Image: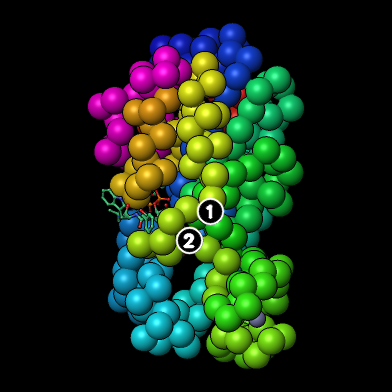
Amino acid sequence: MADLEQACEWLAQATSVAVLTGAGISAESGIPTFRGADGLWKQYKAEELATPEAFAKDPKLVWEWYNWRRGIIAKAAPNPAHKALVQLEIRKPAFTLITQNVDGLHDLAGSGKILRIHGDIWRLRCTVCGANWPNRKTPLPKIPPHCACGGLARPGVVWFGEPLPDGMMKEAEHAAAAAQVFLVVGTSANVYPAASLVPFAKQAGAKVIEINPDETQMSSLVDCVLRGPAGELLPKLV
Ligand code: BV8
Ligand code: ZN
């Protein structure tokens, strides 16, 4: 219990808070995580499909995977963890939500200041003219989808080996450096540069609090570990 009380105290005193979320925060909404047992699709690992190379080789296969994920996400609703972060944002003068998730559940929950550092599964981008537009059709009527210019469309996400959207990492680092409390929720912290935000916030003097039922790459580095599901712990913390 002491850890939760300590975390509550740090959070209550903080006026500036930043949060990094991963797939774990959407697990209780029924969305498979990447590394969890249910993270595989047709025995493919995410790192194999979420790459420009995989798309160049077989855009239909990659789109079938994104169409499958969009189908699952479309049926999912934000859980108490997403909602608790909306409450926290309302209460804190300075608040930034940095998410690795492309599922859009933070948006659906009502969060405002969101940095979608790995993009958005509900946006499409043209591989020819670069047009970028919202598309929430599930299932997609045609796989692969195309742009009005006739160009092949791709998901509006950041693939492995691709840089994050311009300026996004700078903004995330700025928020992490300014935070008195940095929450790390539902991420295994294996993917970079996102994971580098945790030691970055720590070095900048933030109290770093990890919320995760399991050990992660960062557990030894953080100031406080709350072991359990985010849907149960975040509402208690907030
Ligand atoms: C780049 C969008 C450079 C697509 C994603 C340094 C060292 C090593 C490797 C690298 C490095 N630098 C770069 C790399 C390569 C690579 C990388 O990090 N590879 C890893 C695998 C080693 N990084 C990149 O390629 C990045 N780009 O570096 O570009 C560059 C620069 C200039 C010019 C050219 C290139 C881009 C990375 C982004 C890739 N896109 N997603 C899509 O979604 O389809 S990454 C994707 O995987 C997610 O967004 C997320 O980031 C990651 C999955 O991690 P998590 O979200 O943490 O999920 P995971 O399943 O792993 O863990 C879930 C956790 O939740 C677990 O801990 C579990 O215990 C917990 N949990 C479960 N239930 C609950 C819970 N927690 C709370 N409550 C619960 N109920
Ligand atoms: Zn186009």
Q: Residues within 10 Å of mark 2 (few under 14, many from 20)?
A: many
The kind of secondary structure element at disc 2 is loop
Q: Is residue 136 left or right of residue 73?
A: right
Q: Which residue: 72% across, 40% down?
A: 112
Q: Which amino acid, by three-letter code, is at mark 1? A: Pro
- Asked if the residues shown at circle 1 and circle 2 are in contact, with their CB atoms under 8 angstroms apart, the answer is yes
User: Where is residue 50, by image quadrant?
Assistant: bottom left
Q: In x, y percent, where is residue 163?
A: 43, 56
Residue at x 36% of width, y 37% of height: 196
Q: Is residue 91 magenta?
A: no
Instruction: Specify the principal SS of the magenta part.
Output: loop
Quarter of the view holding residue 155? bottom right
Name the spot of residue 149 as percent of width and height, x first.
69, 87
Residue picked out by circle 2 = 158
Label of residue 165 in the image: 1
For ligand 1, tell me if the residue under mark 2 lies within 8 Å. Answer: yes
- Near mark 1 (Cα within 10 A), the count class, few <14, some 14-19 or many ≥20, is few
